[in-house]
């Protein structure tokens, strides 16, 4: 039976450290501040942004939420981003996705000052990551959270054969880059990959981020594989399941993240952690 | 016996088209212009920059070469880059690598206006590529040249299993990104990958860019694989060889680039092609 990679517990430890660090910075006169831009009234986005706001306040940070109606123009959002770029009390800016059709996510994301781009989605930060640049820069929170949980459980990447299923800019690509940068041999695959399940059986470590419930089962894994399940799918019964069939996979894997309680809690904990890091780096002038 | 992927011939075709396009732009009052910054007196760099200069002039472009002694400071290079960024007659800026120790290649590369970054090495352009952004932006010339030669020979990437051996920012990473963006299943490996040769045997298409002469032989390939050899290594006998043993590999592969005459000529042809594209995009405001 696999070790359960406890994201909830790890996130709690990260949050504890974030709170201490936030208090320390506040005592130095630099309270970490995060601003979230929310457009429209998508119920899931409203829940996510409310949770982020509560968590930030709870950890001792400044948090502001800028709400816009779904009819807002792209220029209005760009103006708001520019104001927040100039606001010294804000170290982290996040634009909640998805956005309505009249707003181009790439354009508004790239308008965020790269030093405040807490989601790490802007081209320049993605390029630094993919180019394995030295120095401090923000990285997408879910991938960064995955690396934290692997480090927490002392799972080394160097020389490992990794398969990442899912090519998104939010998860698949940056987690592949992070692992390449740690000298893993990484295959970036998608649900349309030929013989996907022959490929996944070769992986020492597999990351699945497709949004397809139960895509990967125990039969598709190498004995002893480490399984990172990024999927969060709600079944007809209302129950959450991942992209991996936990029951069969946990009999073959050596370690596995559960859903819920695995990668999910790490994402928001990493967002908070990275807000504090951005505040710290702003003092140190990026060092 | 494999088809020989004729880089020299393909490069000649590209150059012909580049010359026509350069003349067309010049007739419109926008002669494409490239500036090369050369630091120190490395003999190989001197030959490369001279070849680039001659080729650019030969194709009807403006070409300027800015030479600096190896003792030059980073600030002097940054000043020169800024001048060239402001110079409307220059559409492409290239800093010849390697640079002396007192100059940080990442810093000076990132100082180039991304719209003039003809090598595509700056973080923002690397990020656009890795994020598969729409629109026009420069891409590293060797990887882009590899894609051109594959297209020339109607070798489709979609759904193919690709192995890239070599994780450099100049070749391995961007070529992997280009192929991911065309829906290939790409594994980015290095010479330290476990069981590298078991891995290379799974590839429909293999790109080798390691600088290790004859690293891959016919025994390491799948029957019918397409082989792209980026290596240029000079043997003790003065003969050039690639990272692939051509003789044995060409008996197993369905298609293969020779060394010399394969990827090499595509790099400089792509540099010229991209200079003209940057000039064209500057007129169209990036469209």
Image: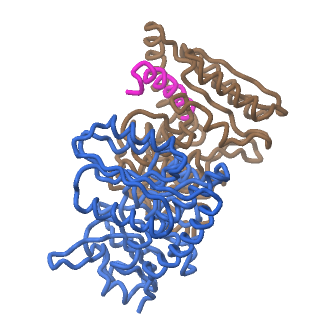
Chain colours: A blue, B brown
**In which quadrant of the rendered view does residue A29 lie?**
bottom right
Residue B45 percent coordinates (x, y): 73, 33
Residue drawn at point x = 59 percent, y = 17 percent: B87
Which one is nearer the viewer's eye here, B110 or B91?
A: B110
Does residue B1 appear in this view? Answer: no
Magenta residue span: B267-287
Residue A143 percent coordinates (x, y): 46, 64
Does residue A281 appear in this view? Answer: yes
Residue B74 percent coordinates (x, y): 76, 35
Number of numbered callouts drawn: 0
**In the image, is residue B279 above or below residue B173?**
above
Position of residue B221 in the picture relative to residue A136 (left or right): left
Which one is nearer the viewer's eye here, B157 or B67?
A: B67
Magenta stretch contains residue B7:
no
Residue drawn at point x = 37 percent, y = 57 percent: A167
Magenta stretch contains residue B275:
yes
Quadrant location, the C terminus of chain B: top left
């Amino acid at each position: 039976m696999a070790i359960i990679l406890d994201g909830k517990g790890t996130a709690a430890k990260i949050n504890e450290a974030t709170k201490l660090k936030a208090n320390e910075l506040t005592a130095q006169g630099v309270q970490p501040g995060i601003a979230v831009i929310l457009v429209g009234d998508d119920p899931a986005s409203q829940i996510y942004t409310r949770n982020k706001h509560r968590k930030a306040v709870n950890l001792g940070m400044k948090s502001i939420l800028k709400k816009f109606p779904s009819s807002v123009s792209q220029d209005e959002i760009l103006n708001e981003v520019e104001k927040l770029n100039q606001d010294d009390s804000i170290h982290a800016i996040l634009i909640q996705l998805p956005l309505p059709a009249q707003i181009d996510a790439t354009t508004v994301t790239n308008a965020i000052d790269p030093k405040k781009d807490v989601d790490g989605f802007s081209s320049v930060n993605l390029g630094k990551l993919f180019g394995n640049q030295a120095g401090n820069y923000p990285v997408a929170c879910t991938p960064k959270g995955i690396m934290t949980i692997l480090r927490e459980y002392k799972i080394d990447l160097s020389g490992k054969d990794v398969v990442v299923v899912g090519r998104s800019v939010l998860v698949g690509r940056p987690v592949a880059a992070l692992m390449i940068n740690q000298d893993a041999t990484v295959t970036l695959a998608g649900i349309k990959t030929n013989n996907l399940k022959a490929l996944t059986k070769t992986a020492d470590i597999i990351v699945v981020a497709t949004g397809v419930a139960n895509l990967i089962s125990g039969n598709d894994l190498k004995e002893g594989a480490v399984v990172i399940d990024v999927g969060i799918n709600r079944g007809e019964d209302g129950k959450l399941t991942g992209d991996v069939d936990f029951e069969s996979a946990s009999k073959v894997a050596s370690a596995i993240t559960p859903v819920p309680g695995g990668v999910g809690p790490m994402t928001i904990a990493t967002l908070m952690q990275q807000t504090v890091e951005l505040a710290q780096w702003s003092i140190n002038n990026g060092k």
